[in-house]
Amino acid sequence: MDEIIALCKRRGFFYPASEIYGGLANTWDFGHYGTLLKNNLRDLWWDYFVLKRDDMVGIDASIFLSPRVWEASGHVVNFTDALVDCKNCHYRTRADHLIEDNLKLKVEGLPVKELTEIIKKNNLNCPKCGQSNFTDVRRFNLLFETKIGIVEEKKSLTYLRGEIAQGIFLNFKNVLNTMRVKLPFGIAQQGKAFRNEITMGQALYRTLEFDLMEFEYFIQPENWQKIYAYWQEQMWHFALLVGLEEKKLRWREHQEFERSHYSKKTMDIEYYYPFGWKEIFGLAYRTDFDLKNHMLHSGKDLNYLDPQTHKKFIPHVIEPTFGLSRLTFTLLVNSYRQETIRGKKRYYLAFNPQVAPIKLAVFPLQKDAKLITKAQAIYQRLKASYVSEFDSSYNIGQMYRRQDEIGTPYCLTVDYQTLDDETLTVRERDSMSQERVGVGRLDEYLRFKLKH
């Protein structure tokens, strides 16, 4: 993990936030290549789950919602984590993480009394000072509180959204009235969410602010198991599509005690990180919990009128959720490679070309004006179709090494033979194999290579 994080900072994928002021725990900034990678994943997800389907529409709901929304959704009461403090050094951590890391037991969602008993019975030690002297476990709410208003005495309490789903439920009736949708259909969105979490310092894996991609798929309740299984298949396929290794993926179903308050069935796709199996995507059957509660608390009719039977009912919901920030980090971990060649270490990121931040780079072999002019002309033509870079600042080995570390699939080198016969060298990132390709057929060649 230390090597991966060092590479990501060195090459501009992400940086510690507020670093010049000593940083702020559990916050990170995406750099140029991290932003490109994240945006490629975002766009691929939107294309796969929304644009290519006829049963999905999109929205972009507000981050700020009425505080009554979070009361109706149950988040004010139920959106909590379990907290424990070391009495010796005052180190604070999540009780379930402390237990899971030491005993390899899944305990998230257990009552605080049981968590306290497990910690004491097993004499678990503080990760910071090594002492076994903890407070009793207690619950704390994950919602970030903020206030709206200009005059201090008239400010009102509200929350930064802890999930992006509620904006979808609030707009259910608007979508019905404007988009001519019929069950089953989904409403999708992407956006920021915020959770006042205690994390274990695993870089971008769990942060205070993060990007989510999810949709609520509205259905009749009779056949929810079949639709649930269908979305399992689609989520697994998407994980492979972005380039995650199948051998490092698995499904895990939540036990009853760890399921969210709104869920009747939840399953996670987990990835095997250097720090163990952890979830990356989640699939929940939320029943009619959210629409029913918003209908009750708002007094608004959120029923669906079946055009065939003319009967009104509250639809049930299947919810696939994808953490975009987490997926970006997971791909960096998944793609990291190192090997030793002739006594020297080589590092590279083996991204699927579809999501690689930079698709190709163009170099002159040497700092010769004729080669630079020719390479620039080829670069200017190609960058209209591919996200590309031009580099003439180092020797060819250093330029290859830099592109390997940012995961560029192909490097094109212009040499003196190019001036004679209009061919150049194309180097493939993973194998480092090279072949001569005619400048005139580069578009055809690259279109094929970048899709396979």
Image (cartoon, rainbow, N blue to C red):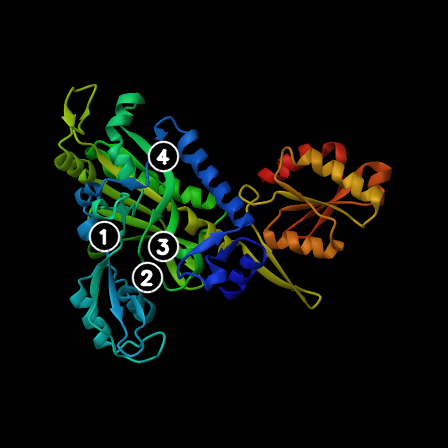
User: How far apart are the alpha carbons under marks 2 and 1?
Assistant: 14 Å
Contact (Cβ within 8 Å) of mark 3 with mark 4: no
Q: Residue 220: which disc?
A: none
Residue nearer the viewer, 220 or 139:
139
Contact (Cβ within 8 Å) of mark 2 with mark 1: no
Q: Residue 198: which disc?
A: 2
First in residue order: circle 2 vs circle 1? 1
- Three-letter code for the amino acid on which mark 2 is drawn: Ile
Q: Residue 79: which disc?
A: 1
Residue nearer the viewer, 40 or 88:
88
User: How far apart are the alpha carbons under marks 2 and 4?
Assistant: 28 Å
Residue nearer the viewer, 137 or 277:
137
Residue 117, by quadrant, is bottom left
- The spot of residue 268 in percent (x, y) is 33, 50
Q: Is residue 392 left or right of residue 65?
A: right
Q: Which residue is mark 4?
A: 60
First in residue order: circle 2 vs circle 4? 4
Q: Vertical placement of 45 versus 325: above or below?
A: above
Q: Secondary structure at mark 1?
A: loop
- Three-letter code for the amino acid on which mark 1 is drawn: Phe
Residue 171, by quadrant, is top left
